[in-house]
Amino acid sequence: ETGVTQSPTHLIKTRGQQVTLRCSSQSGHNTVSWYQQALGQGPQFIFQYYREEENGRGNFPPRFSGLQFPNYSSELNVNALELDDSALYLCASSLNQLPSTDTQYFGPGTRLTVL
Amino acid sequence: RKEVEQDPGPFNVPEGATVAFNCTYSNSASQSFFWYRQDCRKEPKLLMSVYSSGNEDGRFTAQLNRASQYISLLIRDSKLSDSATYLCVVTIFGNEKLTFGTGTRLTIIP
């Protein structure tokens, strides 16, 4: 196990609702990255948090927002849910913010279904 | 053009066979390369990094061709437990994200 945990494991919401997903990073890791994985696709980078600051963002609209807490756990918030937001949401923690030099460890994911 | 392209498969291969996956990337500034393995409904896990000189880990061999912007993964003597989706991943130095391909689905048949 990677030591990265996510909650909840599954979630069902309806269009227009808001959702908050949570991630606890591996002990000692100060960086959390969030990815969205639609069915049949590879994970897509949403954003990264490093020491409580957003440190890079992928091609996702502003209704995707996040937060990192002093203990380096993190939240992903999605407002005004759309059907296409249905996906597996993965968080990954690492020792630093550069995946080229440091392994990212993924949590088990939260499977979100939007009806 | 996608940043990382893979043949989605599926590849159905008999146990004991050798199977090869290919991946191409579009950004010549890509710096680091990886293969991840993802089991059904699970998270991706790092299988191996890929180096210019090529590298081997047991039955797995990874190769990188920077000139052709091409990465490969070879699995020898395949086992039933190798059934999974294999994701090709690249990063650009100084960039904070992993860029994934769509993955290649492999099923090993007894």
Image (cartoon, coloured by chain):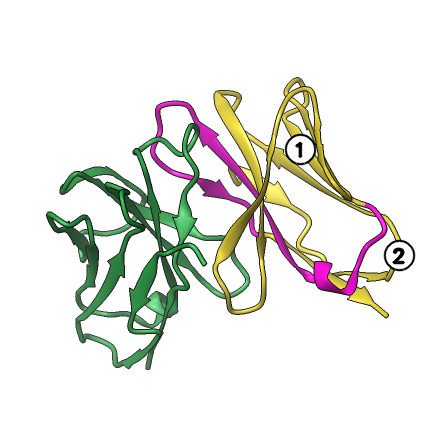
Chain colours: A green, B yellow
Question: Of A90 and A84, which appears nearest the observer?
Answer: A90
Q: Report the residue at 24% width, 70% height from top.
A: A81
Image x and y of residue A99, in percent? 40, 34
Q: Is residue A114 left or right of residue B92?
A: left
What residue sits right under mark 1 in the picture? B71
Label 2 element class: loop
Q: Is residue A36 placed above or below B96 in the rendered structure?
A: below
Magenta-drawn stretch contains B80: yes
Dot 1 alpha-carbon crowd within 10 angstroms: few under 14, some 14 to 19, many 20 or more: many
What residue sits right under mark 2 in the picture? B16
Quarter of the view holding residue B105: bottom right
Quadrant location, the N terminus of chain B: top right
Which amino acid does the dot numbered 2 rest on?
Gly
Label 1 element class: strand
Q: Earlier in the sequence, mark 2 or mark 1?
A: 2
Image x and y of residue B41, in percent? 51, 69
Q: Which residues are magenta?
A: B76-102
Image x and y of residue A52, in percent? 13, 42
Q: Residue A38: give its label.
A: none
Q: Report the residue at 41% width, 48% height from top.
A: A105
Question: Of B27 and B18, which appears nearest the observer?
Answer: B18
